[in-house]
């Protein structure tokens, strides 16, 4: 059994979906394993078939789905039945054109987001005003907080097997946890926080239970041993190394381990002796949401930049741009590799969006705190030297066929 880990090396939106799709068709009997984050991930895959082009932004499903590759949502992935069903409906129409259906298995222990996590998330982030921490609005951080607060409030995928008991647990969360959490947040922030009473009725619970039942008609539950029937595990990460919950940019981070740590834990549990990791970076830096962005530019830094995935929205605002910070990239990869030492990890680099760089003028990047300008080939050579990579790949377009070895 082989293991490949796809990691975003920056603030997210580096091209992890593209790389996962590439690996899905280049390996034997693969399955994509989601091992961090949740529905807030947005991984774009473009599939070209003849004269037709199909595009999907993946949230719950692995980015190999359009190529017929199955998905496993691990115990480190946060499941959201409402978001899952919305995506499943859209994705099913696309897959039907290939004569396929999405195949998803969920770990029994996968934590689940409830409507109350999303509601609290919205209340606190709006109350922060221009001091927002940065959120996608999916309640990821609040799901983690509830899960570690008290076992009585924990909801996992296996609870969907017993919907009556799940309903009772949701009532407990509504009647006990929501008020407790709001008081806790108010005392820490000094903000007056209140939930709209329309969300505190049985209608909200019934709505969620219906979505759980619908999701269960589309997935199967199993444990980690299920993965042993596959030859290749493609661990698809979410967000990026600079958004890791233990990164120096706290509190403008996600409640998730965004590096290789979780994936390696699964690999070790399955007895894999080594894994390949593919660190993915755009050829420039982006951030979609609040928080620091070193050397931020007032607008996109190259005329050819196109991004139809990260559109302006209520929670994240506009996509922000900066020259790629080579020193920060080097530091992040080095620190991530240092989080594990009891399994062989083979590092690789993938540089995306190279087609968006100007090839007749210099490109900009940051090294040792200084903005430098150089030709594309020299820029690529600089990136190759930041770490002893096994292989370096480059992408010159949105599809897996646009990826080449550099």
Image (tube, rainbow, N blue to C red):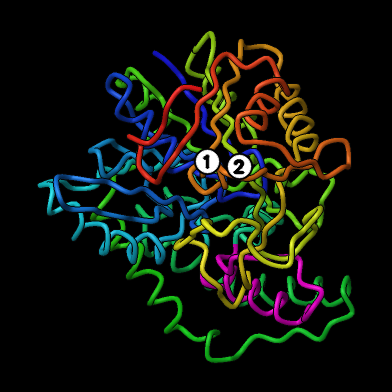
Report how far apart the C-alphas of labels 1 and 2 lie in the structure. 6 Å
Q: In this rendering, would 97 be left or right of 317?
A: left
Work out whether 55 lies above or below 194. above
Say whether residue 170 is visible: no
Report crowding for label 1: few under 14, some 14 to 19, many 20 or more residues within 10 A (C-alpha).
Answer: some
Q: In this rendering, would 145 be left or right of 271?
A: right
Q: Residue at x 26, y 44 (%)?
A: 66
Q: Residue at x 76, y 84 (%)?
A: 193
Q: Which residue is mark 1?
A: 354
Q: Position of residue 55 (x, y in %)?
A: 31, 55
Where disc 2 sits, the SS reads loop
Contact (Cβ within 8 Å) of mark 1 with mark 2:
yes
Q: Position of residue 323 (x, y in %)?
A: 72, 49
Residue 244 included in the magenta stretch of the image: no
Check residue 283 in the rendering and tell me which mark sits there, or answer none. Answer: 2
Q: Residue at x 27, y 22 (%)?
A: 29
Q: 234 or 190: which is nearer to us?
A: 234
Q: 342 or 375: which is nearer to us?
A: 375
Q: In this rendering, would 92 be left or right of 224?
A: left
Residue 14 image-quadrant placement = top right
Check residue 306 in the rendering and tell me which mark sits there, or answer none. Answer: none
Where disc 1 sits, the SS reads helix
Q: Position of residue 357 (x, y in %)?
A: 56, 46
Magenta extent: 115-139
Work out whether 241 lies above or below 304. above
Say whether residue 303 is visible: yes
């Amino acid at each position: 059994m082989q293991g490949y880990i796809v990691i975003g090396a920056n603030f997210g939106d580096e091209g992890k979906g593209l790389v996962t799709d590439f690996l899905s068709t280049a390996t034997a009997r693969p399955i994509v394993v989601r091992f961090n984050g949740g529905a807030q991930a947005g991984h774009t895959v473009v599939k070209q078939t003849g004269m037709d082009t199909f595009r999907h932004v993946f949230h719950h499903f692995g980015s190999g789905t359009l190529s017929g590759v199955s998905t496993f949502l691990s115990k480190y992935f946060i499941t959201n039945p409402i978001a899952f069903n919305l995506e499943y409906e859209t994705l099913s129409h696309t897959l039907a054109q290939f004569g396929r259906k999405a195949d998803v298995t969920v770990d029994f222990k996968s934590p689940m987001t409830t409507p109350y996590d999303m509601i609290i998330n919205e209340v606190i982030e709006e109350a922060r005003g221009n001091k927002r921490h940065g959120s996608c609005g999916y309640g990821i951080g609040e799901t983690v907080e509830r899960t570690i607060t008290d076992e009585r409030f924990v909801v996992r995928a296996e609870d969907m097997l017993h919907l009556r008991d799940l309903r009772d647990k949701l009532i407990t969360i509504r009647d006990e946890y929501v008020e407790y959490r709001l008081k806790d947040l108010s005392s820490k922030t000094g903000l007056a926080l209140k939930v709209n009473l329309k969300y505190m009725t049985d209608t909200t619970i019934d709505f969620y239970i219906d979505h759980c039942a619908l999701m269960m008609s589309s997935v199967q539950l199993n444990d980690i041993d299920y993965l042993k029937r596959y030859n290749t595990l493609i661990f698809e990460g979410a967000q990026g190394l600079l958004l890791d919950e233990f990164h120096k940019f706290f509190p403008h981070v996600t409640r998730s381990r965004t590096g290789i740590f979780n994936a390696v834990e699964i690999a070790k549990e399955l007895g894999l002796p080594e894994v390949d990791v593919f660190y993915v970076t755009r050829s420039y830096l982006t951030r979609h949401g609040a928080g620091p962005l070193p050397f931020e530019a007032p607008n996109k830094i190259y005329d050819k930049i196109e991004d139809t995935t990260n559109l302006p929205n209520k929670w994240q605002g506009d996509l922000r741009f900066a020259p790629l910070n080579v020193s920060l990239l080097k530091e992040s990869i080095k620190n991530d590799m240092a989080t594990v030492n009891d399994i062989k990890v083979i590092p690789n680099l993938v540089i995306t969006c190279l087609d968006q760089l100007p090839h007749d003028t210099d490109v900009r990047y940051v090294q040792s705190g200084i903005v430098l300008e150089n030709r594309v080939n020299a820029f690529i050579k600089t990136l190759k030297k930041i770490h002893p990579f096994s292989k370096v790949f480059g992408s010159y377009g949105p599809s897996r066929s646009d990826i080449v070895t550099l």
